[in-house]
């Protein structure tokens, strides 16, 4: 059947008349975004605190807490809206492609430009871009997301393939009968998935906060008991102890996380890595195994016919000609493209043959097949794997020799009513990418263990792996071990099994892929990566999409992800240290002097300084680790406690010895002195822990530096002019600046020592 598509002019007129083939998504309003931010877990804790303070009549404290809450929400919302705009641009770049017949030529266009009566080619591995009536051919589609049917449905001429369903087998040509909101499904396939669920980072941080809360609550209860026994007025004690719980709440965490990941996603896009799930950034930082397809990542994915071995008196021309008859130029299959490229548009050998029907390659039967008419006779011609070909016994040595040379071997044979004829072998080569060896070496240096997955024979796989520096045993899917470096003779469905097996062994696994059969493995992987030429379903199942050939830009993704991890780690680390320091300082001072070292207003001001600086950590310049990053709560808590204890001792010595004995401060001046020293300790502690080693290798970002300078200046001015406290003279302020500054080196040395003990 000869089908006729639209002309470009007809298509343009239809688009003007019927609109684009897309569903307008109803986005969440800014009002709804703001509302959700006020009812999420962390703001709710602050709101409960405000309610309690209303009962106590502490309206000023309520105003300050509300201001801090609004500040964080506004800043987080600003960056979230910017991220939404970036994701919209990303959706356009990941638009579904459709193969359409326009002006009597097949071309790939974005599916949104399809219109009524367009003629479209549907192939295995692609999402149906509109409601399409089948004109010729047969396909099997997965339409479970549309109709609820769990099994694939076979479609033939006259049937309708619904928009959003997935072609899992076969090939067909059809005509568009409905687009956009007029389709049966009424909703486009969603290719970009924005992670809205709680990330592993948040889960870990909330777990840490739970233990900090218990620690702090115990000390606060003791302080309350001592205060009541000392007959202090409850209306003075209770507000302070309530506000003391505020430093434990990680108010700036959502804001810091949003800023860090949004900026990271933007930077990765510039490096050719489009993040479809923000949580993928976190996974990439901890990835220690990367499973890669050989084709398109290790090799160029530029398949070419490298060798033809005819058999039983046939010529090379006959072998390649029969292989071409068992192929289809409309297919985007690299093997079939290589065959037609070898013919170099000289199809004269096929002039007397007419293809009556064609069955594309199917992984289950491992061959493609055509029914061919020549004059009044008919025969079937096949192109497929040696495993299913009627290979003569004495021809196996050819297969082994070609495999050792690194060729992928296909056989060509034909069947007629009289006999089965084996025509010969085709050897296909896929040259190794020039950057593959360097890429593998860089991944090794980053602590990522590369596993190559290929459908090739063990001999071919071993050869390719040795050329690019992939180490380890050559295994099959029945023998998945740590020492395996290459998996040969892998079926597409085996990739999921391999990824799952290594995850069960405790690894964070990345996976690269490009086709429909890679989708389960890409979705299962902690960091699924669709390469640049991936199918729609592969892109929709992945966490990231590469826009350049090969995996070179994967290095940027890993490095940047580890930098983001380090920024967030510094936030969590510094937050935990300060919780220990503030609570223990107040507790010890009360035990000694029966007096609270800070007032309620001081604690609230301290809360603001803390958030102001730590939010800027999301922009900091940091080193990255050459090993995969994994959260270690035990190490983090213990190290934070030791450093917090050291800071407590240092601050209390400054307050008790210097403040009282050298500077002769009274009790109210001592409180001001204590507030100033604790605020000054925030930038000092951050500078001490933000680097992994003993020395500062990377200077702070300009935003972090500005935030630290402003906090130092502001706290000095508050102490000088007595804002929310009794003023102290410039000499006392200078003592605090110098003495707290001197804490930097011993704190950094202690941090390095504790880390080295853990290592």
Image (cartoon, rainbow, N blue to C red):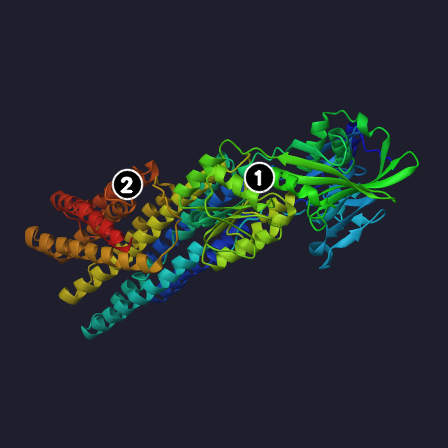
Depth order, front residue of 388/696: 388
x and y percentages locating residue 262 in the rendered image: 47, 43
Q: Quadrant of residue 210?
A: bottom left
Query: Residue at the spot x=81%, y=32% of the render?
Result: 6
Depth order, front residue of 257/732: 257
| Residue 343 circle label | none
Residue at mark 2: 710
Q: Is residue 272 left or right of residue 598?
A: right
Q: Look at the image and tell me whether residue 173 can be seen.
A: no
Q: In terms of secondary structure, where does tag 2 sit? A: helix
Q: Is residue 170 left or right of residue 571?
A: right
Q: Is residue 28 left or right of residue 681?
A: right
Q: Quadrant of residue 220?
A: bottom left
Tally the numbered discs: 2
Number of other residues with Cα within 10 Å of mark 1, as a class: few under 14, some 14 to 19, many 20 or more: some
Cα–Cα gap, marks 1 and 2: 67 Å
Number of other residues with Cα within 10 Å of mark 2, as a class: few under 14, some 14 to 19, many 20 or more: some
Q: State which quarter of the image contains the N terminus.
A: top right
x and y percentages locating residue 699 in the rendered image: 29, 37
Q: In terms of secondary structure, where does tag 1 sit? A: helix
x and y percentages locating residue 200 in the rendered image: 45, 56
| Residue 404 circle label | 1
The relative height of residue 537 versus residue 438 in the rendered view (above or below) is below
Depth order, front residue of 322/622: 322
Farthest bottom residue? 229
> Which one is closest to the eye, mark 1 or mark 2?
1
Q: Look at the image and tell me whether residue 486 can be seen.
A: yes
Farthest front residue? 394
Q: Earlier in the sequence, mark 1 or mark 2?
A: 1
Depth order, front residue of 436/667: 436
């Amino acid at each position: 059947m000869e089908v006729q598509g639209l002309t470009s002019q007809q298509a343009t007129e239809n688009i003007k008349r019927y609109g684009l083939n897309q569903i307008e998504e109803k986005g969440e309003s800014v009002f709804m975004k703001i509302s959700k931010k006020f009812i999420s877990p962390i703001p709710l804790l602050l709101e409960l605190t405000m309610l309690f303070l209303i009962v106590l009549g502490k309206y000023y404290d309520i105003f300050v807490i509300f201001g801090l809450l609004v500040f964080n929400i506004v800043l987080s919302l600003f960056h979230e809206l910017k991220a939404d705009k970036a994701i919209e641009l990303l959706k356009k770049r990941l638009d579904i492609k459709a193969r359409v017949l326009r002006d009597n030529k097949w071309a790939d266009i974005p599916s949104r430009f399809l219109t009524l009566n367009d003629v479209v080619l549907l192939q295995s591995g692609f999402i149906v871009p509109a409601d399409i009536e089948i004109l010729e051919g047969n396909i099997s589609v997965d339409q479970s997301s549309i109709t609820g049917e769990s099994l694939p449905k076979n479609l033939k001429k006259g049937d309708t393939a619904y928009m959003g369903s997935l072609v899992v087998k076969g090939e067909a040509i059809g005509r568009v009968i409905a687009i956009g909101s007029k389709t049966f499904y009424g909703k486009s396939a969603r290719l970009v998935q924005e992670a809205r669920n709680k990330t592993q980072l948040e889960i870990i941080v909330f777990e840490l906060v739970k233990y900090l809360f218990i620690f702090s609550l115990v000390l606060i209860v003791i302080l309350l008991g001592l205060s009541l026994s000392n007959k202090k007025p409850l209306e003075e004690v209770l507000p302070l102890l309530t506000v003391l719980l505020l430093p434990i709440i990680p108010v700036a965490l959502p804001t810091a996380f949003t800023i860090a990941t949004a900026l990271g996603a933007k930077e990765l896009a510039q490096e050719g890595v489009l993040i479809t799930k923000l949580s993928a950034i976190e996974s990439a930082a901890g990835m220690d195994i990367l499973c890669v397809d050989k084709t398109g990542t290790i090799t160029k994915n530029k398949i070419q016919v490298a060798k033809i071995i005819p058999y039983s008196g046939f010529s090379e021309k006959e072998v390649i000609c029969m292989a071409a008859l068992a192929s289809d130029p409309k297919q985007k299959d690299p093997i079939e493209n290589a065959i037609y490229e070898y013919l170099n548009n000289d199809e004269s050998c096929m002039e007397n043959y007419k293809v009556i029907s064609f069955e594309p390659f199917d992984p289950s039967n491992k061959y493609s097949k055509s029914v061919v008419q020549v004059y009044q006779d008919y025969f079937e011609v096949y192109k497929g794997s040696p495993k299913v070909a009627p290979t003569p016994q004495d021809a196996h040595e050819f297969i082994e020799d070609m495999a050792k040379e690194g060729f992928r071997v296909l056989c060509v044979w034909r069947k007629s009513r009289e006999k089965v004829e084996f025509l010969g072998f085709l050897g296909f080569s896929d040259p190794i990418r020039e950057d593959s060896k360097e890429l593998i070496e860089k991944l090794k240096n980053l602590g990522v263990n590369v596993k190559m997955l290929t459908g090739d024979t063990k001999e071919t796989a071993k050869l390719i792996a040795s050329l690019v520096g992939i180490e380890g045993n050559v295994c099959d899917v029945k023998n998945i071990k740590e020492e395996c470096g290459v998996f040969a003779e892998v079926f597409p469905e085996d990739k999921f099994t391999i990824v799952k097996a290594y995850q069960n062994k405790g690894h964070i696994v990345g996976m690269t892929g490009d086709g429909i059969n890679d989708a389960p493995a890409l979705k299962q992987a902690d960091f699924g990566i669709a390469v640049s030429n991936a199918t729609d379903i592969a892109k929709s199942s992945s966490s990231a999409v590469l826009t350049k050939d090969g995996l070179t830009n994967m290095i940027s993704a890993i490095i940047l992800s580890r930098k983001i991890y380090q920024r967030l780690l510094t936030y969590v680390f510094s937050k935990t240290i300060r919780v220990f320091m503030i609570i223990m300082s107040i507790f010890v001072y009360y035990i000694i002097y029966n007096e609270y070292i800070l007032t309620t207003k001081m604690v609230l001001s301290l809360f603001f300084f803390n958030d102001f600086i730590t939010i800027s950590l999301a922009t900091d310049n940091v080193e990255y680790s050459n090993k995969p990053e994994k959260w270690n709560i035990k190490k983090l808590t213990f190290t934070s406690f030791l450093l917090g204890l050291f800071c407590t001792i240092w601050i209390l010595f400054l307050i008790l010895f210097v403040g009282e004995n050298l500077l002769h401060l009274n009790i109210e001046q001592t409180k001001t002195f204590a507030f100033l020293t604790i605020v000054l300790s925030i930038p000092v502690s951050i500078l001490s822990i933000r680097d992994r080693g003993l020395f500062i290798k990377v200077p702070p970002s300009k935003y972090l530096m500005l935030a630290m300078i402003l906090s130092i200046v502001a706290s000095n001015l508050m102490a000088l002019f007595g804002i929310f406290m009794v003023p102290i003279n410039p000499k006392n302020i200078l003592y605090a600046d110098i003495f707290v500054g001197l804490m930097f080196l011993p704190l950094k040395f202690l941090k390095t020592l504790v880390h080295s003990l853990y290592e």
